[in-house]
Image (cartoon, helix red, strand yellow):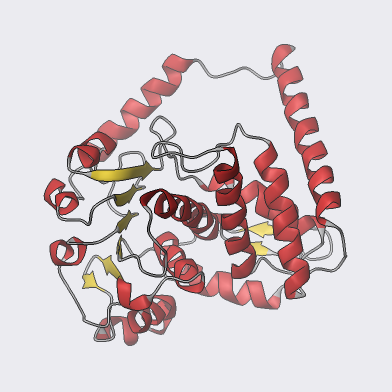
């Protein structure tokens, strides 16, 4: 019913495991992009950050040992994109609330709704390692999207990781381990979902570019290939302007990144045959940049005229304190 007049649909707040089936069935049956930003957008920006973090650490995605804490829609999608982009399943271990994912998890195999998790059971952890401490020992990368509590990831786990280890502690509003604690235990690069710490991993830096690129060429869907292309676009953009251990991805304030992402994603859609119209990279880039600049200019003008009020800083700080207290309490 939406297809004739709506350009794309973003799915929101659909519980696991229903989110997998809803996304996969609609992505194939609808003739407009259906997208789950919390999963695919988060996966795209996480992959971008990981690519640059590994670059700084002098490591390769194909050789990195990666452990995932949490097996929700976001982390399972992150793992799938990493596998598709060159990560090796034998080097990857994922944990849910019942233990590690592996081919012996009959509880997952028996539930057809968990087919995405079962795919990862078959593709990763061939040695069936089942303890977090054992899995993380010697790991190059830890990607956590799990319980928002700073003791979820133990200090001793970080100490046991490989030299120049990379830690993504992305639970909100409280990361699984505070960045300073991870650094004290030897982590080389730490990323979180928070904007008040370095290396924020947030889908907001990918979603506008991906969607803009899909709409620019009237794509029928947003494929995993398009999400991966966006990840590389974001990583390359940041690398071109300079990256460091506390600056691995671009931010929302770097307006140009969205136009570059849009153009790269549009070209990927054309290459995969899911685009309805042809356009050059430059055409998509210039149109996207003009639209973004016009929108931002309009917002600034409305704020200057008093029609939009900026939230007081004290209010934002109080909301954050309340959120942290609620999680801890």
Q: Position of residue 54 (x, y in %)?
A: 40, 54
> Which residue occupies the foreground of this view, 302 or 254?
254
Outermost residue on the front side: it is: 58
- Indicate the position of residue 112 as horizontal and vertical percent values: 41, 84
The residue at the far top in this view is 305
**Looking at the image, is 56 positioned above or below residue 136?**
above
- In the picture, residue 137 is in which quadrant? bottom left
In the displayed structure, 314 sits above or below 163; it is above
| Residue 302 position within the rendered picture, expressed as x and y whole percent measured from the top left | 74, 19
Camera-nearest residue between 140 and 23: 140
Q: Is residue 97 left or right of residue 236?
A: left
**Visible in this render: residue 288?**
yes
Q: Which residue appears at 35% of the width and 39% of the height?
A: 173
* Left or right position of 178 against 173: left
- Depth order, front residue of 234/32: 234
User: What residue sits 17% from the left and 42% below the top?
Assistant: 185
Report the residue at 76% width, 62% height from top.
267
Looking at the rendered image, the quarter that the C terminus falls into is top left
Coordinates of residue 47 in the picture (x, y in percent): 48, 57
Work out whether residue 308 or residue 196 is closer to the camera in this orientation and state it: 196
Is residue 8 in sight in this rendering? no
């Amino acid at each position: 019913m939406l297809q004739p007049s709506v350009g794309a649909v973003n799915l929101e707040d659909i519980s696991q495991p229903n989110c997998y089936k809803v996304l996969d069935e609609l992505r194939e049956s609808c003739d407009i992009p259906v997208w789950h930003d919390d999963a695919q957008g988060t996966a795209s920006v996480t992959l971008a950050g990981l690519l640059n973090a590994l670059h700084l650490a002098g490591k390769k995605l194909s050789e990195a040992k990666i452990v995932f804490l949490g097996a929700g829609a976001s982390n399972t999608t992150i793992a799938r994109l990493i596998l598709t982009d060159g990560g090796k399943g034998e080097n990857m271990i994922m944990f849910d609330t019942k233990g590690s994912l592996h081919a012996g998890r009959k509880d997952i195999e028996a539930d057809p709704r968990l087919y995405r998790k079962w795919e990862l059971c078959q593709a990763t952890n061939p040695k069936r390692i089942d303890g977090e401490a054992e899995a993380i020992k010697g790991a190059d990368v830890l990607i956590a999207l799990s319980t928002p509590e700073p003791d979820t990831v133990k200090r001793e786990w970080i100490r046991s990781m490989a030299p120049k280890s990379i830690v993504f502690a992305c639970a909100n509003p409280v990361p699984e381990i505070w960045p300073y604690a991870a650094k004290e235990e030897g982590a080389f690069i730490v990323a979180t979902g928070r904007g008040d710490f370095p290396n924020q991993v947030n889908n907001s830096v990918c979603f506008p570019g991906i969607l803009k690129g899909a709409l620019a060429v009237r794509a029928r869907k947003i494929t995993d290939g398009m999400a991966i292309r966006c990840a590389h676009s974001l990583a390359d953009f940041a690398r071109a302007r300079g990256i460091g251990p506390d600056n691995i991805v671009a931010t929302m304030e770097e307006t140009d990144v969205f136009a570059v992402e849009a153009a790269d994603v549009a070209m990927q859609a054309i290459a995969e045959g899911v685009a309805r119209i042809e356009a050059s990279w430059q055409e998509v880039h210039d149109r996207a940049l003009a639209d973004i600049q016009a929108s931002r200019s309009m917002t600034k003008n409305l704020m200057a005229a008093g029609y939009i009020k900026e939230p007081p800083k004290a209010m934002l700080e109080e909301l954050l304190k309340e959120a942290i207290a609620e999680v801890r309490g």
